[in-house]
Image (cartoon, helix red, strand yellow):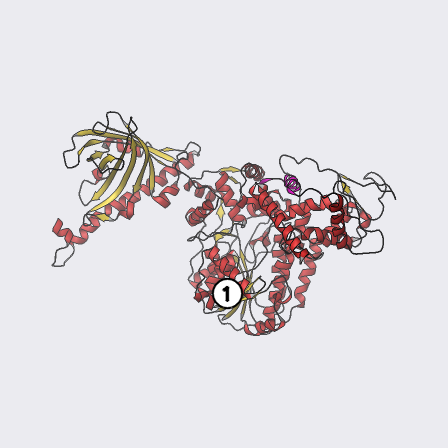
Amino acid sequence: MREVNENASAYAGQRATAEAIERGGGGGLSVDALLAKVRTAAAPAPTGSDAGGAAAAVSDVVPDVEGPTAVVPDVKRPTAVVPDVEALAAAIAAVAGRHLPEGHLSPDADFFDAGGTSVGAVELVAALEDELGMEIDLDDVFADARPTSLAHRGLSTAHPTAALSAPAVSQTPTPGTTWAPDTTGTATSEGTVPAPGILPVPAPRTAPAAAVTPAPYSTARPEDLDQILADLALADRLPWTGDPEPLPPRRILLTGATGFLGSHMLLDLLRHSDAHVYCLVRAADEEAALGRLGEALKKYELPWSSEVRRRVTVLPGDIRRPHLGLSDELWTTLTHELDSVVGVAAAVDFLRGYQSLRQSNVIGSLTLAELAATGRPKPLHHISSIAVFNEVGITAMGEDDPLAHVDRLVAGYDQTKWAAEVALRRARDHGLIVTALRPGGIGGHTRTGAYNPQDLSSGLLSAFGRFRTVPAFHHLNAAPVDWVSRVAVGVVCEPDAWGYDYNLTGVPNTLDDVVRDMALGGMHVRVQDWDEWRTHALARLEAEPVPELAFLTRVLRSPTALKLCEATLKGPAATAERTAALVEALGLRPAARYDAQAQLRTFERLAQDGLARLPHKDDQPYLWFSETTEGGVGPVGAPADTPCSMALTLSLASMYQLVKERRVDVTGELTCAAVHPEPLVVEHGDVWIRPEEGIPQRHGMRHRLLSYRLALRDAEGGRWWLEGHKYARARRDVWRQTRALTVEIGREGAPATLAGELVVPADTYLRDQVDGIKVDPRLTSQEKRAAKLTWLAWFGLEMGRGLLGPFARAAADLLDLRRTTTPSEHHR
């Protein structure tokens, strides 16, 4: 128990260090800067008896073997004698275990599957160099984070003759490596081969360049290709099966229900079918699994009611384990009782390699295929990804087009999604009905705004809005989660749709679409080429660290993840004829472009969470124009015979104000001798267009067109308020109604003391408010014209609706044949 407690305490300390790094902006630092932070935050190296105890603790982990004894090097002089791969793997596993929740790691287990994080991986690289003298590249850890694989790679890189049975790895020492001197033999990077079992001591790291230049990663690693071919062959071992009953499913197994898409699919399955859903949740027991599922649904603003719980059975398990981590009895029961399997669960990480992701994304999918093919025949609905086409230079991404060449997929995520889909195509030859559903980027919910913070599309959109720059891309194949989920559930519940491939990518966005949408939201962006945008984004993320975007920083620094980004942004538009036909046949909402209106709630949520920044009224105006009014005011209830005028500037920080608030900002001056001899300054002002949606006043005969609310300050510092309204009435003087403003003026905190009417002169209205519109000079001439036309069209439509209301109401009263007069008729 003492050892367990010590491990837990050590992990807590490491976790605190990791959180401190992220809060301090670790996400925006280079790998070398992160390593420096880790070393600075680590405890001082033990000395004296403590040092001896530490060395003994590590040596206990290394098993006894024949040959030279494994020596744990001193921290100040990292030198190690390693007898073989197994001993080194055990030592690496001991070091890695300190960065995991459980406190230990098997040499053949994956660091990330055991609960490791990206920050933990950085700490692991630093610890391996300090304690074992191994200089392992961070990309190697992400590519394959099993201690055995890291040992093979470390030995093959440092000592070519000690590679033993390592799989297909480079036999050339890495540049900058020197050999530690030894009494039994001398070896340098320039001279003889070192003595067996001597681990190389890396030379000091060179200072990183100011801008990270990714290596030209263009093909997959040979060892990954070998593993992919081996995994594809596993599909040939699946049992043969027959056709399932062509009926809507009643008992469904759903994996990934705690994820973004999976949680929405769970609710859609319950809403649009009578099925009972069995949810596989990674947890120690049923109580923990139920709690985790409930928290996930609440996180995405989905209901977790008694009715939902009544129709859901939670199965604690793990898709990475044989038989999903279920008992043999439960597995057998499910094979005979289920009538549909829906696989949504996947490890989505753009930094990890194929070896690190295959257990979740490939082996897990084959386990679901085994479940579907065993016992009662069942269809398998597999959530794949448009990433199966992520080859740079691919020309078509249709539902039946050839997938990418796997040797040209570099990112581990792309490789695993490709391997899983191709393996399941082989399963079709065994009689299994397999449906492949390929989402692209999954955007936020159009109504709730719920989003996936780790989705690459969300991260890129956040960066676009935050930094006001976008890379020059061809298409963004993205759709909102509510549409993707609903269409996927429609396929699951419709037997005639089973067994085909579907692209759930919606209507792709072009570069012009994104620039225009962001301009309508007041976020005017500058287009840059990919390399320039990446350098600029990394510099901004380093200068202004955003913990929530730390994953995007790591993606932009990883050569393999950059290849994924390049393929995503430079690829063609995905086509989805089969999906469109199915949506029409099922009467579902057709695909629409994920535009500014659809993204509105998501952008608000992103802004609340610190990932994006919405326009503010203090920003430089997007569009503005002048308004001059003249008239008179007087004491309330008395003639308005005191001259009064206003010179105002009405401005918009963004079109977001109109879409969301229907509000215009106001600045300017009020000149009125009845208030003060000197002009009063507008400190804060707003104009609302058709406030309260034009709900009528005075028995329906007066409709508000505009409402003004100004906070004023006189020359002595006195504070005043002004409130005014433009009304629409069923009268012939329509032109004057759009210009006449009924006002009330009073001191701050006191009732109105002055009232009157101010009117915009007829000869200034068109000159100032149409021809005199000014637009942000940073926009192009085309964008300026579009901004003016958008404002005039929106404002003209709203004014037209406001003016039409009273006339429509009056016409309805005139045509009313009831004998009893209405209140409005009596008033009239």
Furthest toward the right, the residue is: 184
- Magenta-tinted stretch: 28-47
Residue 97 location (% of width, % of height):
68, 53
Q: How many marks?
A: 1
Q: Name the quadrant of the N terminus.
A: bottom right
The residue located at (50%, 42%) in the rendering is 464
The residue located at (41%, 38%) in the rendering is 616
Judging depth in this view, the residue of 621 and 708 nearest the camera is 708
Judging depth in this view, the residue of 249 and 386 nearest the camera is 249
**Magenta run includes residue 37:** yes
Residue 412 location (% of width, % of height):
64, 52
Residue 578 appears in the rendering:
no
For mark 1, give the secondary structure: helix
Label 1 Cα neighbours within 10 Å, binned few <14 / some 14-19 / many ≥20: many
Residue 234 location (% of width, % of height):
67, 64
Report the magenta stretch's main SS: helix
Residue 68 left/right relative to 117: right
Circle 1: residue type: Val
Judging depth in this view, the residue of 798 and 607 nearest the camera is 607
Residue 424 left/right relative to 177: left
**Magenta run includes residue 42:** yes
Residue 438 location (% of width, % of height):
54, 57
Q: Which residue is mark 1?
A: 492
Judging depth in this view, the residue of 124 and 221 nearest the camera is 124
The image quadrant of residue 114 is bottom right
Residue 40 appears in the rendering:
yes
